[in-house]
Amino acid sequence: MTAILVRRKQRLAVRRAARRRVSAGLEAWLASDEATTLGSLNDAFGEKLLAAACLTLMAPAALPIPSGGATDVMSVVSTLFAAQMVLARRSVWLPGRWRTKELGARTQKGLHALIRFVKVCERISRRRLAGLITSRSGGRVLGGIVLVLIVGAVLAPPFSGLDTLPALGVVLIALAILLEDAAFAVAGIAVGAAGIALSVFLGSQVTEFVSSLVS
């Protein structure tokens, strides 16, 4: 009984921290005795879980180092959350296996770097077009954009580092929802679109070069 009360108290503390600041919520979530799972992330961010999950899962891919495809699993999971954003679901559906699976060491390492980035964003952010960002229609549009960017990150060639910009775009859009600041959404769309355009351009150049060799 005492253990249950302690866990409940910890969950409340994490949720209060998340309500104060996004970075504080992430720090409290990582520092709590509970496993760093998507289920415990839900306890921290509640109705904003979809954005928080995309932010968390895409953080490692947004690091400026080639992933070698290691982050693709997290990206695929992120598509489930993005799809639910498009559907404007109020209650989040998540398979039980994913709800209780602890995030890997690479993801947790990426989260510590992410928290430092989030703190910088919090210092420069303010509420801009918050009503539009948090509305159902706004959430649907942003969810669709996030879905496209995640697919772009997954389809980027392994070891190329070209998944970084689309993943960073997702991180910025997720921050726009969590911070209720449309400026981050605009930045995320621009960064993500540039990343996908770069992937398409380089891909076409490589295809043209290979074709010239075999022709």
Image (cartoon, helix red, strand yellow):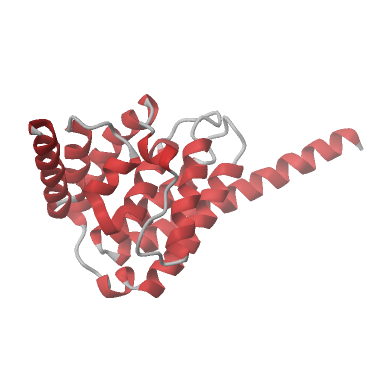
Residue drawn where x is 52% and y is 43% of the image = 76
Residue 177: name its quadrant: bottom left
Q: Is residue 85 left or right of residue 72?
A: left
Q: Is residue 20 left or right of residue 40?
A: left
Q: Is residue 146 left or right of residue 18?
A: right
Q: Which of 211 and 32 lies nearest the eye of the viewer?
A: 32
Relative height, residue 203 to residue 32 (above, below)? below
Relative height, residue 132 to residue 207 (above, below)? below
Image location of residue 3, percent across then percent down: 12, 31
Q: Quadrant of the N terminus?
A: top left
Image location of residue 72, percent across then percent down: 53, 37
The count of marks equals 0
Q: Is residue 104 left or right of residue 192?
A: left
Relative height, residue 110 to residue 178 (above, below)? above
Residue drawn where x is 47% and y is 65% of the image = 86
Residue drawn where x is 36% and y is 47% of the image = 53
Q: Residue furthest right?
A: 215
Image location of residue 192, percent across then percent down: 48, 53
Residue drawn where x is 38% and y is 58% of the image = 187
Image location of residue 109, percent across then percent down: 32, 28
Q: Residue furthest top?
A: 105
Q: Quadrant of the C terminus?
A: top right
